[in-house]
Image (spheres, helix red, strand yellow):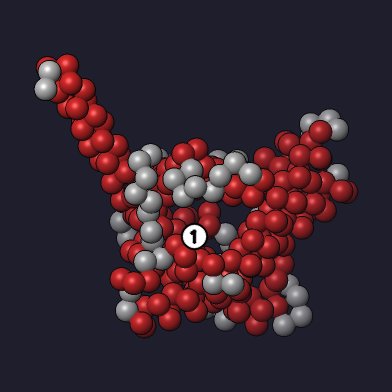
Amino acid sequence: MSALTEARHATKNATRKARGATNDWVERLGRVGYATKGVVYALVGILAIRAAVGSGGSVGGSGNAVREIGTQPFGKALLVLTSIGLFGYALWRYVQAAMDPENNGTDGKGILKRVGYAASGLMHTFLGVNAIQLVIGGGSGSSKKTWIAKLMAVDTVGPILVGLLGAFVVGYSLYQIHKGWTLKFKDELKTGEMSQAEVKGATLAGRIGLIARGVVFGMVGGYLIKAAATAQPGQAKTFGDALSEIASQSYGMVLLIVVAAGLVAYAVLQVALARYRKFPERKV
């Protein structure tokens, strides 16, 4: 074997090892991210349940949960860890969107899924930045409502973009509900490595959790469409606003407890994904 051939083989082996190391880091950060997401959604659900039963909680979305983390003992350290987890989850979503390691493809369905991954990455990036801002005392930045109002202010195209965003969110909510009802999420789990009790628990939690989350996101998307149709940015509502809207209905507190319990179930699914999610072996 010539020196040139040996050099080529050495280069290929080094490249494989580097890619493998990158994959390992992406997987580790992704798993930490799923666990962190589970903590955030568990807090969203628990705080809403506490508010519903009058024991001092508050109704809000993921941003509210992050702020709650900051109020705990060693809050700033916990916020730093939370931000790392959120950034790790965002990185995994960006890899899914850009590199397509799970072979979703470039047809219409595949593109929509990858756009959804990118949107999820952005959302969790902003949430991670929010956590860092709370650590350094800079507040939580502009709210989603402020961002929507600025977008709506763009002549002609603004309301159209908000309406399209609302339609996308509604579509995503239907996808979540379908994924939960059909148990499609189980394809992402290494069920062969799980005990029978773990499979049953993750299956029940996933079905309930995805449907509950899908319902809330459906409300958010509907309100975005309403804001676009009426040219009134104030009609747009966040995830936390949607939970508050549920609480304001007849038997609202009962409904809120049901939905909030569903969000806690969704958190359980995220913890299961943190441990047992299938990560592709394809080099990214």
Tell me if I can see residue 82 in this picture. no
Task: Name the side, left or right, on which 131 lies relative to 164.
Answer: left
Residue at left 59%, top 41%?
106
Q: Quadrant of the N terminus?
A: top left
Q: Looking at the image, which residue sits at the far front? A: 1
- Identified by mark 1, the residue type is Ala
Which is nearer the eye, 86 or 206? 206
- Please state the horizontal and vertical placement of residue 184, each as a whole percent of the image: 54, 67
**Residue 272 position by quadrant:** bottom left
**Residue 153 position by quadrant:** top right
Q: Quadrant of the C terminus?
A: top left
Which is nearer the eye, 190 or 126? 190
Which is nearer the eye, 51 or 34? 34
Residue at left 60%, top 73%?
181
SS under mark 1: helix
Which is nearer the eye, 64 or 182? 182
Residue at left 17%, top 27%?
10
The residue tagged 1 is 65
- Please state the horizontal and vertical placement of residue 78, each as a whole percent of the image: 34, 54
- Please state the horizontal and vertical placement of residue 37, each as a whole percent of the image: 44, 58
Residue at left 12%, top 17%?
3
Q: Label 1 crowding class (10 Å Cα cut-off): few <14, some 14-19, many 20+?
A: many
